[in-house]
Amino acid sequence: MVYLKWFFLLVVWTLIGAFLHYSLPRHDVVRIVNTYEERIDLDTWTRIFWSDPTEQAKTLVNRDVKFIQGVRPNGNSIVYRNEDTGWGWPPYFKFDTANLHTEASDSISARDNPRWVSVTYFGWRNLFFTIFPNAISITPVDGPDDKPFNWFTTLFLIVFGGSVGYGYYCWRRFRRNRITPALEGVGDNFSAAGEAFSQKRGRFQAWLDTWKSKKRR
């Protein structure tokens, strides 16, 4: 039972961690090499990793999506999708896809004369399932090592961790002061009822024994 409890907690916290890792913003320093638009099919389960900013978009099986191609300082390539999030989740309230596409196109540079930018994004890149992170904003930086500190995610995780810790402390205190005494009281009542029943049964058995002895005489 103990192992089952820890396995359940491990699964729950893994799902929470994955959810936060997907939803919270991150920063990449890249050199943008291209922007393009491509029609994407949305008829598989991976649709959940694409935005549905409008009610009409939810009914489409394919649509045109803008992309931003970049190269990291170590030479690895990265591709971001550029979609509005609208009023959906995560709540970035992004409505400037066209403007961001223009900014990205204006930031394109060659390897010989690089222009480095910080791309703020959320989501994952998965080649097998064709999943792309969603770019939120682009900010010029001085160089490939000029990566901004992720203040929002850091502060959010501190507040989230503190809230979870405080909630656990309150639960432990509530359980110790209220639930455990109540359960012990119920257990004591059951024990007392069992003892009373045993005593009554013993007296009844003794009374029966007296009748049996009278019959033998």
Image: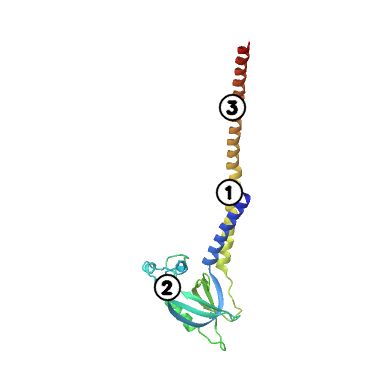
Query: In the picture shown, does residue 153 fall above or below 174?
Result: below
Residue at image coords 51%, 77% = 79
Between disc 3 and disc 1, the foreground one is 3
Query: In the picture shown, does residue 186 fall above or below 132?
Result: above
| Alpha-carbon span between mark 2 and mark 1 | 47 Å
Name the outermost residue toward the bottom.
112
Which amino acid type is shown beneath numbered disc 2?
Asp
Q: Reading the chain from its start, which is encountered first: label 3 or label 1?
A: 1
Whether residues under marks 2 and 1 lie with C-beta atoms below 8 angstroms apart, the answer is no
Left/right of residue 54 with respect to residue 3 in the rendered view: left
- Given residues 17 and 2, the one toward you in this image is 2
Q: Badge 3 is on which residue?
A: 197
Quadrant position of residue 117: bottom right
Whether residues under marks 3 and 2 lie with C-beta atoms below 8 angstroms apart, the answer is no
x and y percentages locating residue 28 in the rendered image: 56, 75
Q: Which mark is residue 171?
A: 1
Q: Reading the chain from its start, which is encountered first: label 3 or label 2?
A: 2
Residue at image coords 59%, 62% = 158
Which amino acid type is shown beneath numbered disc 1?
Trp
Q: Is mark 3 on a helix, strand or loop?
A: helix
